[in-house]
Amino acid sequence: MILWDVSPQIFEAIGIRWYGLLFALGLIILGPWIEGKIWEREKLEPKWLDSLFLYVVLGTVIGARLGHVLFYEPATYLANPIKILAVWEGGLASHGGTIGVIVALWLYSRRVSHKPLLWILDRIAVPTGLVAAFIRLGNLMNSEIFGRPTDLPWAFSFVRSGEYHKILALREAGLTLTPEQQQLLDGTLGWHPTQIYEAVAYLLVFAFSMWLYWYRDAAQKYTGLIIGYFMIGVFGSRILVESIKIVQEPWELDLIAAIGLNMGQLLSIPFVLFGIATVYWAYTHPNTPSVKK
């Protein structure tokens, strides 16, 4: 097994965490830089780009937080609504973040660019796979959101995780451990590093989106094609990886028993269907050929 005993904090004295750094590197630095290159290539209004950054950041953070609240712990936060604001305590849902960005970009399209929603979605999708990969690597540094136990040679022993320490607490309390729990403590079993699986999948989606935009000129030729493939790639891979992931909330076990899917998989299905429909629409409604800039 691969022993993963990395501290989630870069500088413990001032509380700087790897997750925050990677989140900022993707969302605030690399994503906007790539978007700026798109703006330069198409000679778009610079003021549109300044507004876009604000809309995307707010849509991501607000959507991700509300997504976690509504999809995973509604009872907890409805009982104490002020805790919704405590983003620093954790609790961001990628599906909520995606919905938040779409809503924000709809407002952006109406108020700023005055172009169709799919127009901006195609362009924002290009760097988003990279941003998502950085966020998953942040989850890896936090030793969170990983997969079920496995004896594969690349399994990770997340000794700083809550799951590991729960098993330790059971042993220290003198309770009998299951063979699987004992193996997890001994290091003969580890967990699937699903954060890495997802990060690799998102990097592949990012590379494909870049290829579509820069080499196939897809944003000019087929409105909606890039965002369609993005949705299929990101959320299709999410459905697959979720099948080996530990559930985030205990009640998801009942959901799996009832329909065979956890919340992450269930929420991913509409995005995949949207992607398929958008790709079909894009190919059946190509744009009028234009001179490549």
Image (cartoon, rainbow, N blue to C red):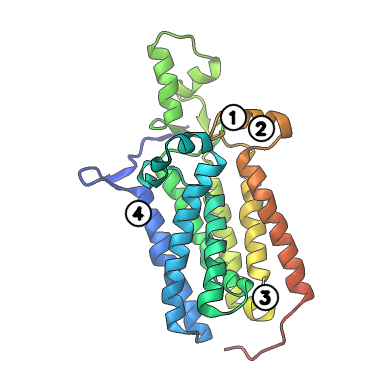
Mark 3 = which residue? 223
Mark 2: which amino acid? Leu
**Element at badge 3?**
loop
Mark 2 = which residue? 255
Rendered view: 135 above or below 3: below
Disc 3 and disc 2: Cα gap in Å?
37 Å
Q: Residue at x 66, y 32 (%)?
A: 255
Disc 4 and disc 3: Cα gap in Å?
33 Å
**Number of residues whose C-alpha sits closer than 10 Å to that of mark 3, classed few (under 14), some (14–19) or many (20 or more):** many
Pick whichever of labels 1 and 3 is earlier in the sequence. Answer: 3
Mark 4 = which residue? 21
Disc 1 and disc 3: Cα gap in Å?
40 Å
**Element at badge 2?**
helix
Viewer can see residue 133: no
**Element at badge 4?**
helix
Name the quadrant of the C terminus. bottom right
Q: Nearer the viewer, mark 1 or mark 3?
A: 1
Rendered view: 85 above or below 189: below
Q: Nearer the viewer, mark 3 or mark 2?
A: 2
Left or right placement of residue 198 versus residue 20 in this view: right
Disc 2 and disc 1: Cα gap in Å?
7 Å
Mark 1: which amino acid? Trp
Disc 4 and disc 1: Cα gap in Å?
32 Å
Mark 4: which amino acid? Leu
Residue 260, quarter of the rendered image: top right
**Number of residues whose C-alpha sits closer than 10 Å to that of mark 1, classed few (under 14), some (14–19) or many (20 or more):** few
Mark 3: which amino acid? Thr
Pick whichever of labels 4 and 2 is earlier in the sequence. Answer: 4
Q: Residue at x 43, y 15 (%)?
A: 170
**Element at badge 1?**
loop
Rendered view: 48 above or below 208: below
Q: Quick check: marks 2 and 1 in contact, CB under 8 Å?
A: yes
